[in-house]
Image (cartoon, grey):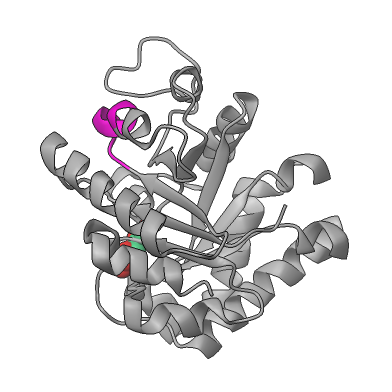
Amino acid sequence: MRKKIVAGNWKMNKTLAEAQALTAEVLGMVADEVTNDAVIILCTPFPFLLTVKNQLGTNRIAVGAQNCSEHDSGAYTGEVSAAMLKSMNIPYVILGHSERRQYFGEDGQLLAKKVDAALRHGLTPIFCCGEPLDVREKNQHIELVKKQVEEALFHLDAAAIQKIVIAYEPVWAIGTGKTATTAQAQEMHAVIRQQLAAKYGHTVAQEISILYGGSVKPDNAKELFACADVDGGLVGGASLKSRDFVEIIKGVG
Ligand code: 13P
C-alpha cells in the first residue's frame, strides 16, 4: 500500500556504541515530537541490525538492511542472504543503491535476482534507481531510469510489484549537498509512476511508494515530500544526525 516513508541509510558509518546512541536519540525524539504516521526505517550496517532492532522493541520505527545476496545460502564468503535477514525479522532491504552499482558492479540482471530473493523471503525491497550527472547533462536521465526500473522489476507480476518501494536517487545529488529541485524530483517520480501504470495499470501504480533520495535535509524535506508523486525520502548523511533526521521525518506533515 502506498505510504509515506522516511528511511535513513546509514551506509558504512558508526561504531556499535554510536549506532546505539543514535538509535536512542531518534527513538526519544520520534516519541516526543513526530505526530504524522510516516513509516520510519533505520537501514543500519549488517552487524548492528539485531542490536538496533532489539533496542527499538515494539516501537513504530523499523529496521532495514542495505543489501542482500541473490542466493539463499552456500559458499559465498562475506555475503548475507535474504533468508538470514528474514530469520532476524528484518522487514526491509535496500537494493540497487548507486554505490552498489558503481563500486560493486551490480547491474539490472543481478538486481532482478536480488529482488526475487528478497520477495521470496517476505522482505520489502527498497529498490534504488537514478542517473549519474553525465547522463542528465545529455538529457538521457528519463531513458536510463526507466531502463533501470524495467530491468530489475518488470519480470514481477502485479501482486509482487506492489510489495516494492522505489527510491529515485539521482547520483549527482547523493552526498553532494546538491538536491534535485522539486520540479526535477516530481518529473522523474511521475515518469516512474506512469511507467508502472503502463505496465501494471493505474490502480497498481497508485499503490507504490516512490521515495526521493539525494541530499535530503531538514530545510528541503518538506517541499520535496509535498510533491504529488514523492512519497517520502531515503536519507543518507542527514540520517546520521538524530536532530536532522527527525526534522526530516516531521517534513512529511
Ligand atoms: P545523502 O542524503 O547523503 O545525499 O545520501 C542519499 C543516499 O544515498 C541515500 O541512500
Magenta segment range? 44-51
Residue drawn 48% across and 17% down? Answer: 87
Residue drawn 44% across and 76% down? Answer: 135
Where's residue 123, x and y in %? Answer: 57, 33
Image quarter for ligand 1: bottom left
Left or right, 50 with respect to 161, comes to left
Task: List the single residue furthest toward the front.
Answer: 32
Residue drawn 44% across and 21% down? Answer: 88
Q: Is residue 126 above or below residue 213?
A: above
Q: Please tell me in which quadrant of the rendered image residue 179 appears.
A: bottom left
Left or right, 12 with respect to 209, comes to left
Q: Is residue 160 above or below residue 203?
A: above
Membership of 45 in magenta stretch: yes
Give the position of the C terminus as an image quadrant. bottom right
Which residue is nearer to you in this view: 30 or 168? Answer: 30
Where's residue 231, x and y in %? Answer: 59, 67
Count of residue discs: 0
Membership of 145 in magenta stretch: no
Left or right, 73 with respect to 228, comes to left
Task: List the single residue furthest toward the top.
Answer: 74
Residue 157 visible in rendering: no
Where's residue 136, x and y in %? Answer: 45, 81
Which is the main secondary structure of the residues drawn in magenta? Answer: helix
Residue 2 visible in rendering: yes
Where's residue 216, x and y in %? Answer: 36, 73
